[in-house]
Amino acid sequence: MDRIVIIGAGIGGVQAASSLADQYCVTLINGEDETPYYRMRIEELLGSAGPESIAIHPDDWYCGKGIRLIHGRAVRIEDHQVYMETGESIPFEKAVIATGAEPRILPLKGNRDDIIAIRRIDDVLVLKEKLEGGARSMTIIGGGLLGLEAAAAVREHFDVRMTVLETADFILPNQLDAKTSGYIQSLLAEKGIEIVTGARAEEASDDSVILSDGRAFPSDILCISAGVIPDISLASASGIKTGRGIIVDNHLSTSMPDVFAIGDAVELDGRTFGLAMHAREMGSYVASEIRGAGEGYKPSDVMTQLKVAGISLAVFGSKEGNRHEIAAGNGKAVIFEKGETITGIILVEAKQLLAKAKGAIGKSLESFLASVN
């Protein structure tokens, strides 16, 4: 059987390995020591859950599928060989780079050296140790999804003063409009999470964070969750063309023959990706490409379903046009309409409307309202 090497064991890499294992000899290289896991669930480890609870599959699943799972760091690809940091080389007929993304590190003044970038299991375990050590205050720089989830998880298990600093004028600006964001912010405040918007952190002292306007916030623990950047280190070391990410065509091929790239690491038509849904579908697509059945990858339209501090959200389409809000049980639906056509819908605690909302983009507001009444 042809040998396939997949470098990176996140959602996309595991999906590709699973889709190819029945026809090929698959090696999956995991750059972390743990069993491949769901990164978006790492905050669960702040409670009593162990790493095995967030594993994508148990250890023995890989052996059962015939997938060789190895742990280590790949440093170079050359002449149909993947070279490992240990000196081992792994031959392949086709390879897939699925190295994901790295946390964006902010250039803060000060010499504080214990800042935690919330991205991996190890980061959360370090955070938990600090919390159990008696910390009384914590600041998270970044009001995105992972930062807010971490803030809520900490407050659920530990009695600390929690502050989240967001540079934008409101939290979750990529997903929400200002008014809906304000509503979510009020719900978070009820959980003991203080949100400070328009806040640009400038300096980190031993026990506080200082903003550009001079305000200071006590911070026994300081975390950064300020987005990610594609991990292009392996591709760059191998002479593969990169930009902001690893540049691929619509077949997910890189500039190196027989080498593909997927997930958060890639750049396609000038666009980078950061959602699990795209990583998973790229993993499935690249398997069809390797089998010779690929017809060109087209990213799905963004449809985000998530929980923020236990609050369920679903986001469809864009936030263009006139804003309408309707009650939906204990939640609400926010509808955007332009030229009598729905351009986007945000559901807050309104899962009962998911099916209707999925098919409503492009239809009239009147027809949607009639369907939910």
Image (cartoon, rainbow, N blue to C red):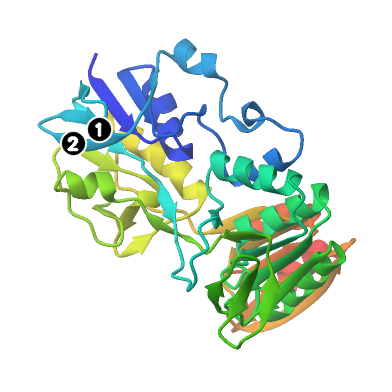
Q: Does residue 356 appear in this view?
A: no
The answer to whether 331 appears left or right of 208 in the picture is right
Image quarter for residue 107?
bottom left
Residue 51 x %, y % = 62, 30
Q: Residue placed at 65% from the left, 70% from the top?
A: 208
The answer to whether 221 is drawn above or below residue 68 in the figure is: below
Give whichever of 338, 104 is nearer the camera. Answer: 104
The answer to whether 240 appears left or right of 341 in the picture is left
Of the numbered discs in the image, which one, if any, rests on residue 77?
A: 2
Q: Amino acid at mark 2?
A: Ile
Image quarter for residue 345?
bottom right
- Callout 2: 10 Å neighbours few (<14), some, many (20+)? many
Of the numbered discs in the image, which one, if any, rests on residue 95?
A: 1
Q: Does residue 171 appear in this view?
A: yes
- Contact between marks 2 and 1 (CB within 8 A): the answer is yes
| Marks 2/1: CA–CA distance | 9 Å
Q: Amino acid at mark 1?
A: Ala
